[in-house]
Image (cartoon, rainbow, N blue to C red):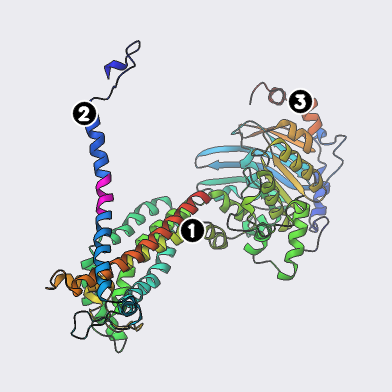
Amino acid sequence: MLSAAPGGRVHGRSAGLGERLIEVGLLGCGLLSIFTTAGILFVLAIETFAFFREVTLAQFFFDTQWTPLFADKHFGIWPLVSGTVLTSGIAILVALPFGLLAAIYLSEFAEQRVRKVLKPALEILAGVPTIVYGYFALVFVTPILQAMIPGLAGFNSLSAGMIMGMMIIPMISSMTEDALYAVPNSLREGAYALGATRLSTIFRVVLPAAVSGIAASVILAISRAVGETMIVAIAAGQQPRLTLDPRLPVETMTTYIVQVSMGDTPAGTLEYRSIFVVGAALFVMTFTMNFVSQRLTRRYRSAV
Amino acid sequence: MASAGAPTAPEKLRMTQSAHSRPGRPRENSVNSEEAATKFRVRRLAAWFGSQQVLHGLDLDISKQRVTAIIGPSGCGKSTFIRCLNRMHELVPSARVGGEVRLDDEDIYGPGVDPVLLRRRVGMVFQKPNPFPSMSIRDNVLAGLRLTHQLARAHANEINEKALRSAALWDEVKDRLDEPGAGLSGGQQQRLCIARALAVEPDVLLMDEPCSALDPIATARIEDLIHTLRERYTIVIVTHNMQQAARVSDRTAFLLTGELVEYAPTDRIFTAPSDKRTEDYITGKFG
């Protein structure tokens, strides 16, 4: 602005109306996402409250069946929770070792050139649409698994969980690699100077120093798996079942929401409200995990 | 882990004593450095980072159970030099070493030498204290033995106490051994790193500007410690601080742009240097 020239005036405002408008516009964009979140929370809370006026908390927490769409209605949340926990658990069992080892390789062994190619290549896995993963699990992985595992149903949590695990490998490997890379080299040198080998340096010094970053990545990956919808809706089935047998069809919380919202359930009914209750429960689960993950990340940033 | 006293010298060491008093180096016989066995024999030592040569053929002998100081301006290759003595230099990608370094008459760059085993004999303390953040004080001290799978559980407390006493840290931390090592003050952290290095029972301790991140009081404590450790260990210390070199060392080497300008008993270097460049450096004309 010309008014700020040497010897010129210093009182008044240099920013014109245009700049003020831009400022307000940017603020509005920021507020929009906050309002959206608040709105979602508000709707969830209202519908959940309405739901619990008709169904008691005891029915919700102490029943072992979930059949809101049947004549004989049961509202026990645990079959949906077990479906979610089972598929996510299988996903983590697959993703954790592969993600961790990939991260160790990228951070500690790979040359800079290899690292520059491999890391983005791995991250492409996360960019594949989840519906593609879902059909991949259903029409490709499940038949292969059925040939090996007797009693494996066409819809099952094993195949869905494994493919979901593939999907979240890059989340774990990428964030873990960042955490390992952030470990100061002086610690590695300190270990080498004591006569440590490369492997004991990695497993006893570097990994423990990055543990909160690694934990954060794992928790975030779990919450991604818990919230994942398409893969489990397509490949894991739609039968709420309180089981930990990975060969059977199950229904996850997300799948139930899809099932009901795709159907012709009229608004305002108890069936309709049940999806908000499940949504609220899901929200509490993922929110808790994201919160813990953020706390851990902050701790590892301040520790390094 | 029995030796509280001098590390037991290998048989070969005795042969090098005669090799030490070679002709052509009269300045090695000075008042305060009586005949001492050679620990390191460095010949034509050269080092590179990629295509950049940082050491240009150094020749020097480092005496056993003496303190040898390496001084010189920034970038002269001091740190690179001592990192060649425990083969830490080669950990940097593209780094390369030429020439010969003999430890107790054994070529440490010879075929069949495992740098990992070498580093258990040649300990190192770094510029910035680097205790392992995930470990307690005790675990830091024992880290070297754990990392190398040599720790006998029955002796752990004994080793821990002995190493911390040797590093003059025991009295300050004996009541909080399970607290994190990173919670100590900078000077204490550095002594913890010294204790950690000593617990592996090396014969040599390399110190790369160990006091540059410390205040004067903490520095004085480390220097006192160096005086005591001298009786048991061969110490090579890189320092920016010429007073420190004068205070702690028996011999001093002056490096300039990767070359050894002068290597003599410390009192001679600081009172009657024979090279004009040494004199200019220690009187503060450059550096």
How much space separates mark 1 and mark 3, taking CA atoms? Answer: 56 Å
Q: Which labelled disc corresponds to residue A41?
A: none
- Asked if residue B113 shows in the view, the reply is no
Q: Residue at x 29, y 81 (%)?
A: A145
Q: Is residue A225 magenta?
A: no
Q: How many marks?
A: 3
Nearer to the camera, B12 or A232: A232
Q: Where is B35 relative to A110, above or below?
A: above
Q: Position of residue A273 (x, y in %)?
A: 21, 70
Q: Position of residue A137 (x, y in %)?
A: 25, 74
Residue position for label 1? A212
Q: Which residue extends farthest front?
A: A53
Which SS does the magenta portion mostly show?
helix
Query: Which region shows up in magenta?
Result: A31-37
Q: Nearer the viewer, mark 1 or mark 3?
A: 1
Residue position for label 2? A18
Q: Does A291 sit left or right of B240 as displayed?
A: left
Q: Quadrant of residue B221?
A: top right
Q: Secondary structure at mark 2?
A: helix
Asked if badges 1 and 2 are on one and the same chain, I answer yes
